[in-house]
Amino acid sequence: MIVVLKSNVPEEKKEQLTEWLKEMGLGVHVSNGSYHTVLGLIGDTSRLDMDLIASLDIVESVKRVSETFKCCSRMFHPEDTEIRIGDAKIGNGSFVLIAGPCSVETEEQIVETARAVKASGAHLLRGGAFKPRTSPYDFQGLHEKGIELLKTARKETGLPIVTEIMSRADLPLFEDIDVLQVGARNMQNFDLLKELGHFGKPVLLKRGLANTLKELLMSAEYILANGNGNVILCERGIRTFSDYLRNTLDLSAVPMLHELTHLPVVVDPSHATGISRMVPPMALAAAACGADGIMVEVHNDPLHAKCDGAQSLRPEEFDALAKKIRAVREAIK
């Protein structure tokens, strides 16, 4: 249920209504917009008298929310969420470039790549320290050492870092990480999602290989409902009948998610296509369809990459892409 308050309601009266609703055993999510304040009520609202609440002089309207996701809903939070990470802004009209290698391999590799992507306009550095791989014999990442190398790259460039967490047991290692990524395979690891809600750090949540948009939003709901509103959704391609690309990039998900939720949405064309030459056109399409950013794999030596070299751009290719993206963004303003 949502309660829309009239404009210019005194803070004292807002607080009185909020406290009364909490005494009824409900969680209250307050969204302060430009013209109205929206109270999102979480819990068993069947005992509430809608007519009584609607009759209050500070209330403009009362509505029941049919969606199973509440905190993520655009009805609960009409204004776009804007997440600040260092000097970068994600959402609410801004566009962010997240770039870096699939996995951290050496100090030289991650620092050199970080310097290159920053020079091209990247706002955040991505790099995997823990790598979930289909085969147990593939490179699994450097783990703790990889995290330390990411911090070294951040110190050298000033770029905030994004890296994947696979287990809640590893949370202590991520205390100084700027954005925690939840990969497609962990999208429905609900114990991890609940812990990330309490952890409070920004979370980049990837859509699973065969998951619906509703399931993605319900996973985000676990994080928001546990107190962390800094969630970035990521469309990274889904498994279909396509036999030439790694996955199928569902760009229709971007405008649909913007209708359903206030959370920012970024696109990962690298994992979606699996082929480096396919990344630039899909990244440009993501910028054109209203995404809040892209996450692209960039490696200083893709031919010798330990992980996903085939889908990684060279620094000069990323530089050319970044320029085209800026032109697309300017064109659609």
Image: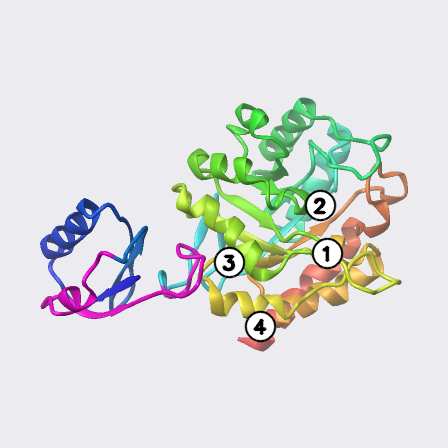
Q: Position of residue 1 (x, y in %)?
A: 31, 61
Crowding at dot 1, Cα within 10 Å, few <14 / some 14-19 / many 20+, comes out as some
Which residue occupies 52% across, 29% down?
176
- Measuring from the top left, give residue 256's x and y in whole percent: 55, 69
**Disc 3 target residue:** 264
Q: Is residue 324 visible?
A: no
**Residue 51 inside the magenta-drawn segment:** yes
In this rendering, is residue 72 above or below 190? below
**Mark nearer the N terminus (4 vs 3):** 3
Circle 2 residue:
116
Q: Are marks 1 and 2 in contact (CB under 8 Å)?
A: yes
From the viewer's perspective, tell me whether residue 6 is left or right of residue 185. left
Q: Amino acid at mark 4?
A: Glu
Tell me which segment is drawn in magenta: 47-75
Instruction: Tell which circle, 3 or 1, labels the residue nearer the N-terminal end.
Output: 3
Asked if marks 4 and 3 touch (Cβ < 8 Å), the reply is no
Q: How far apart are the two marked residues, 3 and 2, measured between alpha carbons? A: 26 Å
Earlier sequence position, callout 1 versus callout 4: 1
Q: Secondary structure at mark 3?
A: loop
Q: CA distance from mark 4 to mark 3?
A: 19 Å
Name the image quarter holding residue 128. Answer: top right
Please name the residue that numbered disc 4 is placed on. 330
